């Protein structure tokens, strides 16, 4: 999945696959996680968020199933 670099103290890059509604997040520590069943609208809100880490913690981390892929 292609990811775009973001300005964050915790997140290095993010990407999204519309077909599978999968959000991929690469953290600065090197971990890569995929979050499933994430709507395109929520992904766009995440992209626009001033604080990627806060948005991820508040709206995604404990709300969607995920797996570590890297």
Image (cartoon, grey):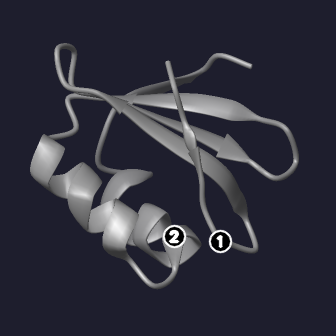
Q: Where is residue 22? Give x, y as percent.
A: 32, 26
Numbered disc 2: secondary structure: helix
The tag earlier along the polypeptide, 2 or 1, is: 1
In x, y percent, where is residue 61?
44, 51
Residue assigned mark 2: 52
Which quadrant of the figure has residue 69? top right
Relative to 39, is 15 on the left or the right?
right
| Residue drawn at the location 67% of the way across and 72% of the way down | 8
Labelled disc at residue 66 = none
Question: Marks 2 and 1, how far apart in space?
Answer: 8 Å
Q: Give the residue drawn at x 75%, y 74%.
A: 9
| Mark 2 surroundings within 10 Å by alpha-carbon count, few (fewer than 14), some (14 through 19), many (20 or more) | many
Q: Is residue 51 above or below residue 34?
A: below
Instruction: Judge left or right: residue 1 versus residue 60.
Output: right
- Does dot 1 land on a helix, a strand or a loop? loop
Which corner quadrant holds the C terminus?
top right
Residue 45 is left or right of residue 48, and the answer is left
Contact check, label 2 and label 1, Cβ < 8 Å? yes
Q: Residues within 10 Å of mark 1 (few under 14, many from 20)?
A: few
Nearer to the camera, 55 or 2: 2
Name the residue located 51 percent from the left edge and 25 percent from the top edge.
2
Q: Position of residue 37 (x, y in %)?
A: 20, 29
Q: Which residue is mark 1?
A: 7
Rendered view: 65 above or below 49: above
Left or right: where does residue 39 sit relative to residue 36? left
Percent position (x, y) of residue 47? 37, 62
| Comparing labels 2 and 1, the label whose residue is closer to the camera | 1
């Amino acid at each position: 999945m292609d990811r775009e670099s973001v300005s964050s103290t915790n997140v290095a890059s993010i990407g999204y696959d519309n077909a599978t509604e999968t959000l991929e997040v690469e953290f600065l520590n090197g971990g890569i996680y995929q979050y499933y069943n994430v709507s395109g609208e929520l992904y766009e809100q995440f992209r626009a968020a001033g604080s990627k880490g806060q948005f991820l913690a508040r709206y995604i981390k404990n709300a969607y199933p995920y797996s570590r892929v890297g």
